[in-house]
Amino acid sequence: MDPIFLMNSLWVMFGAILVIFMIGGFILLEAGSTRMKNAGHIAGKTIFTFGLASLVYWAFGYGFTFGDNANFFVGMTDFFYSGEQIEGESLSTAAFFVFQLAFAGIAVTIALGGFAERAKFPVYVIFTILFGIIVYPVVAHWIWGGGWLADHGKQDFAGSTVVHLTGAMAALAATILLKPRIGKFNQDGSSNNLAGHNQVYTALGVLILWVGWFGFNAGSTVAVDDAFFGFVALNTTLAAAAGAVAATLISWMVLGKSDIPTILNGALAGLVAITASCAFVDTWASVVIGFIAGILVFYSVRFFEKKRIDDPIYALSVHGAAGVWGTLSTGFFATPELAASVGGQAGLFYGGGFGQLGVQLMGVIACGAFAFIVSFIILAVLKKVMNGIRVTEEEEIMGLDMSEHGSYGYPEQFSASETKLNS
């Protein structure tokens, strides 16, 4: 067997493992960013929904994204994917399937961040299924599966739009329909800080995501023969570093202190932003892209707070605002040589004019609008037929660990508290 085939397959499988391990990062990030009474719920539902999303992708998602007889809107074959090797491919198609399945699972996880601390568990189940069939695969096909945005030369190497913006716009639909958590906003419009219970968990979650992102971005080269994955990995980590530093500096300047959640959001925003452009820009540009993302996420969080939109894990800012910026950034910074590798145009700053920037903007608007509108309709229908998508006030105050699952994530802590109250 061709050694390059084996090496490519091994590389993509390793990338898939790294991306799936990112689910552990999301568990720690989301659980740490929310309150103790919901920690077990966050962890359990994340594992369950990733499992459910995997089955949905196997049954329908992969076919709608990459199926043959594809059209500009959606693919039409390869449902209930068999794992059969496609002749002529330079790597195992089964390994490629697992890699793409992991991306779909990450998109769902981002979307469900908008449900945090207040959604009914059955809503997670139904939305995961429908998002995995009629939202994510459609956007993925448009850009990665030979759809209409691919025909226009849309550049999104590893998913600033496909994964992050799509997930964030679904999260936005959820936050609007679920409305803010109890106690988040006051009648005068001011907000209260419902602080997450464990910043160490959150920081460790970010580190795991940072490491997993090498599978996300560098793994998307799906080849080892030219070692281009090293360049992609370099751009990835430079952008994350610049995002963390920029967020630290802006929080220090504005707040007079280096706010820890802002630092962590800055690193993630840098990672999200570079995901589209990591294969198309020079290293200096990756630093600029990450630095701008770190500043952008700081102000985006405050914008949504002022609009009374409750986003517990900052999905709208980290994955949405940074996803938009990352997608547009290739229209500014893509070099002629790197853009030519995928048949794209150079960015504005390299003499490419506004052509690629226009394509990138068109992709942001089309994909963002589609993901938001379809997600909003799904949730609005569920809200009608399920007699609401939010838990009761009593259940929310109690915490979803107990109300939805019957046990606490921290049983010793809560048992001690209840004993003290009863004594």
Image (cartoon, helix red, strand yellow):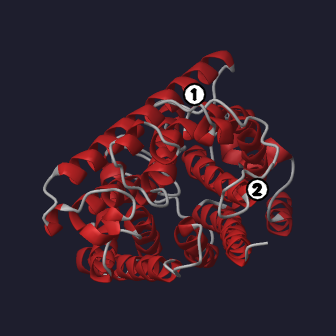
Q: Where is residue 413 in the image (x, y as percent from the top left)?
A: 80, 68
Q: In which quarter of the image is residue 335?
A: bottom left
Report the quarter where the C terminus lies. bottom right
Q: In which quarter of the image is residue 340?
A: bottom left
What residue is rendered at 82% in x and 44% in y?
Answer: 82
Q: Position of residue 322 (x, y in %)?
A: 37, 59
Dots 2, 1 in contact, CB < 8 A? no
Q: Furthest-top residue in view?
A: 385
What residue is rendered at 46% in x and 38% in y?
Answer: 147
What residue is rendered at 19% in x and 50% in y?
Answer: 355
- Disc 1 on helix, strand or loop? helix
Of 310 and 50, nearer the camera is 50
Q: Residue tagged by mark 2?
A: 94
Q: In which quarter of the image is residue 382?
A: top right
In the visual, does 315 lie left or right of 378?
A: left
Label 1 amino acid?
Leu
Say few, some or many: other residues with alpha carbon within 10 Å of mark 1 (under 14 / 14 to 19 / 20 or more).
many
Q: Residue tagged by mark 1?
A: 379
What residue is rendered at 74% in x and 58% in y?
Answer: 43
Q: Give whichever of discs 2 and 1 has the lower sequence position.
A: 2
